[in-house]
Amino acid sequence: MIENKIMVSVTCITYNHEKYIADAIEGFLMQKTNFQYEILIHDDASTDRTPEIIKEYEDKYPDIIKPIYQTENQHSKGVKVGHFNRARAKGKYIAICEGDDYWTDPYKLQRQFDYMQKHPECSLCVHAANRVRPDKAKLKTPVRPNQGDKLYKVEEVILGGGGLFATNSMLYPAAFNNNRPKFFENAPIGDYPLTIYLAMNGTVYYIDEFMSAYRVGVKGSWTERVLHNIDKRVEYFEKRTDMLNEINRYSKYEYNNAIKKAIELNNYSLLSIRGKFEEAKKEDIYYTLNKRNKAKLFIKHYFPSMTKVLIKAKRNFRNE
């Protein structure tokens, strides 16, 4: 070991992930590093066997696995549960992986750690991730924002949205957990404002290697609960616009052009979700769309039943 102290704190938030939590923990434990790391797991009062499975691992690895077992669900009370792990993290860096995702490369942490150590100006290190079904079958649409390693600009992160990088690929200095800006408080989801904040405070380095897996289609997941519900999708995009405006003020309008464009994309999405085709066409962003996306909007408005068929066909294609 090159260090006697903990260098990386792995933070894992879980709730009713009995089918998946073992994969996540095994991915943490298989990491081959020349430094110490800790595994911080927060279980938000799961009603299935998730706490029992975590306890089995805790008993085997008490020095590295440090869980919190809530007796009352904190998320339902409006508490942002990520705070529980961040507040007790001892590492110089934070690595993120939720309980239904997992890491696939035993050298993931070491590679990211080595880069961060050599480049102290780096505020976020990410990598490619496979998108998989709940049964681990790979989909044809991985989270791979670029072919080849790349340094990302703040504007690219802003315009990339929350899905630019896989959350379970993120490693960043723990120092950025202190005194987070106010725009985090009203953010509808945590990873998007986090990537923007980190990008504004250093460099963002992307490693073009697949080192983790991001599960989609998990029952009860954020995507299922929010993006598949029209009212919640509308609320999400409205809050995201508010957040972007707050970020604009926080950055003293340094990235105004990128933020304005991101808000335009948000407004366009809202109009599209609400089926306001004619209004969507009046948005400046509409004229930057390619023919395919314009056709999708047209079909969605005038042939809604066909849209459902196409969405189902697309999902089947991805799952082949």
Image (cartoon, helix red, strand yellow):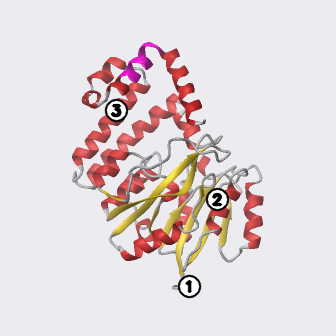
Q: Does the magenta stretch include residue 299?
A: yes
Q: What span is colored magenta in the figure? A: 295-303
Which residue is tagged 3? 267
Q: Nearer the viewer, residue 71 or 282?
A: 282
Q: Is residue 87 magenta?
A: no
Q: What residue type is labelled 2?
A: Ala
Q: Which mark is residue 71?
A: none
Residue at disc 3, secondary structure: helix
Q: What residue type is labelled 3?
A: Asn
Place of residue 101 in the rendered image (x, y in percent of width and height, measured from the top left): 60, 53
- 199 vs 62, left or right, is left
Marks 2 and 1 in Cβ contact (< 8 Å): no
Please identify, in this view, whether the residue under mark 1 or under mark 3 is nearer the observer. Answer: 1
- 293 vs 15, left or right, is left
Which residue is tagged 2? 24
Q: Which residue is drawn at 73% across and 55% down?
A: 50
Quadrant of res 225: top right
Between the C-alphas of marks 1 and 3, the distance is: 51 Å
Place of residue 197 in the rendered image (x, y in percent of width and height, measured from the top left): 36, 58
Between the C-alphas of marks 2 and 1, the distance is: 24 Å
User: Badge 2: how crowded within 10 Å, few (<14), some, or many (20+)?
Assistant: many
Quadrant of res 316: top right
Marks 3 and 2 in Cβ contact (< 8 Å): no
- 153 vs 109, left or right, is left
- Quarter of the image with the N terminus is bottom right
- Quarter of the image with the C terminus is top right
Residue reaching furthest top? 302
Q: Which amino acid does label 1 sit on?
A: Met
Q: Nearer the viewer, residue 269 or 171?
A: 171
